[in-house]
Image (spheres, rainbow, N blue to C red):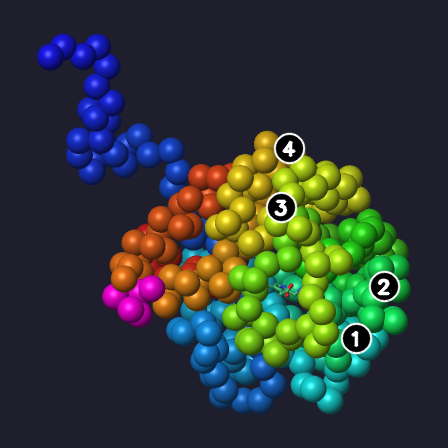
């Protein structure tokens, strides 16, 4: 048999495969989500995220030092707000002595070069568990945006490098950019969750922060998973309003969206390998049905291949260990 082209030539050894590989993961790709709790010396495993913890700030700071030592360069902070501090205005979100603000300061003090990104949305602070202010059973847009601006300014004041609005209200990126400028935070960046879908895969995260919506769902602000063009519309608007980095979330069921967004914009694209995606791999591995390490690397490589320049992932530390 004579073949003019033999594609298997480039697959015949590990050496040639690595030489021609189109995508390579690096510790520089990852953003590490952190769940922070009040208290001291506390490490609580999240039931639906085995191997992932909600830590008190002292434990978190130690972890962040270790992460920097491993080559990880950025963390994305989420805090668990005490029930008695939750209300419908979300005002604990911009308390200058709040857990979020203390966490930002403590991490920047301990590891100044670590990029600190912060989640901006009202759900952990909302007595309704919604990302915005509720009036007559509706999540109102413009008042919520005002709250998000205050929240972003307070994160910048505490030392955050990037604020990451995950709420999906209209017009919040432009308003936050303007608020940061007016308060002298011209160096604080915005990583916008620009195409964030209403997804069942956020379930374990809501367990971690006790932030599940108290009524209804998030479909009047997060996107319908049936839609693709809408993701481009949302993303292009966020870029025009001043986003520095855009994001697609979730990642795995949305690889087509990551690619389309990557082709549509000329700024870095991130993807969030979310809690439910973590839980699925952990559960299958626990059952002995999947090889966890291989599943982690294949998943993260696929997200990068789809077009993600950055990946927020609960597997960041595992991936770095597997890569080095
Ligand atoms: C809050 C927020 C959520 C996630 C990140 N920021 C949950 C939600 O929108 O309900 C999900 C992250 C994950 O599932 O890993 N606005």
Helix, strand or loop at disc 3?
loop
Relative to 191, is 44 on the left or the right?
Answer: left
Residues under numbered marks 4 and 2 in contact, where contact means CB atoms less than 8 Å apart: no
Q: x%, y% of residue 257?
A: 57, 41
Q: Earlier in the sequence, mark 1 or mark 2?
A: 1
Q: Which residue is mark 2?
A: 140
242 above or below 264?
below
| Most frequent secondary structure within the magenta stretch | helix
- Label 4, on which residue? 264
> Could you give the CA–CA distance between mark 4 and mark 2, rounded to whole angstroms?
30 Å
Please state the extent of the stretch shown in magenta in the rendering: 284-288
Helix, strand or loop under label 1: loop
- In-image side of 101 versus 274 (left or right): right
* Residue 77, x across and y down, in percent: 60, 68
Q: Residue at x 61, y 70 (%)?
A: 78
Residue 298 shows in the view: yes
């Amino acid at each position: 048999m004579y073949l003019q082209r033999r594609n298997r030539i480039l697959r015949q050894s590990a050496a040639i495969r690595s030489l021609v590989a189109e995508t390579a993961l690096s510790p520089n790709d990852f953003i590490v989500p952190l769940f922070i709790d009040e208290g001291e010396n506390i490490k609580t495993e999240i039931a639906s995220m085995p191997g992932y913890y909600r830590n008190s700030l002292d434990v978190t700071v130690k972890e962040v030092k270790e992460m920097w030592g491993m080559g990880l360069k950025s963390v994305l902070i989420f805090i668990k707000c005490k029930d008695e501090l939750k209300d419908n205005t979300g005002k604990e979100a911009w308390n200058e002595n709040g857990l979020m603000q203390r966490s930002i300061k403590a991490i920047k003090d301990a590891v100044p070069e670590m990029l600190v990104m912060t989640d901006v949305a009202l759900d952990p602070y909302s007595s309704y568990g919604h990302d915005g202010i509720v009036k007559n059973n509706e999540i109102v847009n413009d008042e919520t945006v005002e709250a998000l601006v205050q929240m972003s300014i307070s994160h910048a004041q505490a030392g955050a490098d990037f604020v990451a609005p995950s709420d999906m209200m209209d017009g919040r990126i432009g308003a936050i950019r303007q608020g940061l400028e007016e308060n002298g935070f011209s160096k604080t960046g915005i990583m916008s969750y620009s195409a964030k879908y209403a997804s069942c895969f956020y379930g374990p995260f809501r367990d971690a922060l006790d932030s599940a919506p108290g009524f209804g769902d998030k479909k009047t602000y997060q996107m319908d998973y049936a839609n693709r063009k809408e993701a481009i519309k949302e993303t292009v608007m966020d870029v025009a309003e001043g986003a520095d980095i855009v994001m697609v979330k979730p990642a795995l069921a949305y690889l087509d969206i990551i690619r389309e967004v990557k082709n549509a914009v000329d700024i870095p694209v991130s993807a969030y390998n979310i809690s439910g995606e973590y839980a699925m791999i952990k559960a299958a591995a626990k059952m002995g049905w999947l090889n966890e390490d291989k599943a982690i690397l294949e998943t993260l490589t696929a997200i990068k291949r789809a077009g993600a320049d950055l990946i927020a992932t609960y597997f960041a530390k595992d991936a770095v260990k597997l890569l080095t």
